[in-house]
Amino acid sequence: MSNQYSDGLTFWEHLEQLRVILIRAAVVFGVCMVAAFMAMPYIFDRIILWPCDGSFPLYRLMDSGISSGWLSDLSASSDFHVSLVSMELTSQFFIHFSAACWGGVLVAFPFLIYLFWGFISPGLYPREKQGARRAFFWGNLMFFTGVAVGYMVVFPIALRFLAEYRISQAVTPMISLDSYMDNFFTLIILMGALFELPLVAWMLGRAGILKRSFFKRYRRYAIFGIAVIAAGVTPTGDPFSMAAVFLPVYALWEMSAHLVPKNEPAHDSSETETP
């Protein structure tokens, strides 16, 4: 019995190809991580720590809204500034290293997907290849769009509220670098994953698991749930902050609804109409 696959290669030849792919992926990730490690001081000052300063674009937009009268003074942020402290001796080094790893993953992600696509594509049918190409392209695009929304909107709003929240005026806040970075990466990666919802809905729709009627039936509950989440992330209550969180997430819901098929009865081509 032959142990060759449809592309003419044996199991061991496929295994050798996979080994080469994994080595190349490790090299790509290593190069990107080293580059991110070397550039991390600049990345920290100009990108990661930028939401700590009142010059961040979202804060300036809020300031312009306050001056024009369409935002309340609850959103005042012109004098907003967060000072971070390092509580442990080794925390800055380990954060430098972990941030470089995350940066390497983000930069190398499209290249890694391309490498693994080259490994699996020979075993796919033409229609499957077309669907997989679209899935990989839109998956990458939506993930990085979610990361951008998390960085530019969600994290700054959450940071401003949490940094200014006081359970008592007798308590002096001291925000540690570790706490800041944990929340920074958690919210940004979470938003990147959340923006994959339309792709997941599309894949479930193609598999026949999900239908458009699901979104129609539960739309009002989704609106309520998203509004509650937006209010929880932005407890200041001003409409701009709530809309900045609510609208992107609700847009993902509607996009997902339009990517799945309608509830149309399947027609069997073998059946004929009877008079």
Image (cartoon, rainbow, N blue to C red):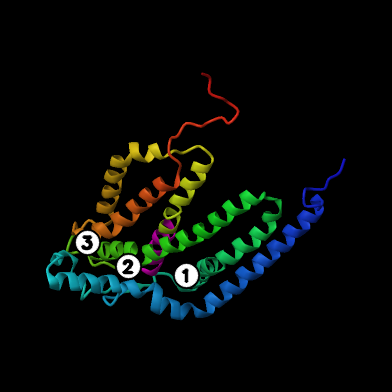
Q: Which residues are magenta?
A: 175-190
**Any magenta on residue 186?**
yes
Dot placed on the residue nearer the N-terminal end, 2 or 3: 2
Q: Residue at x 62, y 53 (%)?
A: 129
Comparing marks 2 and 3, which lies closer to the viewer?
Answer: 3
Q: Of the residues shown, which amino acid type is indicated by label 2?
A: Ile
How far apart are labels 3 and 1 at the CA level? Answer: 33 Å
User: Of 51 and 82, which appears nearest the observer?
Assistant: 51
State which quadrant residue 27 falls in.
bottom right
Q: Position of residue 240 (x, y in %)?
A: 22, 61
Q: Of the residues shown, which amino acid type is indicated by label 3?
A: Phe
Q: Which residue is mark 3?
A: 240
How far apart are labels 2 and 3 at the CA level? Answer: 26 Å
Q: Of the residues shown, which amino acid type is indicated by label 1?
A: Ile
Q: Name, please, the residue furthest toward the left.
A: 69
**How busy is the neighbourhood of tag 2: few (under 14 within 10 Å), some, or many (20 plus)?**
some
Q: How many numbered circles does the render carry?
A: 3
Quarter of the figure with the N terminus: top right
* For the residues bearing labels 3 and 1, Cβ distance under 8 angstroms: no
Q: Position of residue 247 (x, y in %)?
A: 30, 55
Residue at disc 2, secondary structure: strand
Q: Position of residue 206 (x, y in %)?
A: 52, 43
Q: Which residue is mark 2?
A: 175
Which mark identifies residue 242? none
Dot placed on the residue nearer the N-terminal end, 3 or 1: 1
**How busy is the neighbourhood of tag 3: few (under 14 within 10 Å), some, or many (20 plus)?**
some
Dot placed on the residue nearer the N-terminal end, 2 or 1: 1
Q: Which residue is mark 1?
A: 95
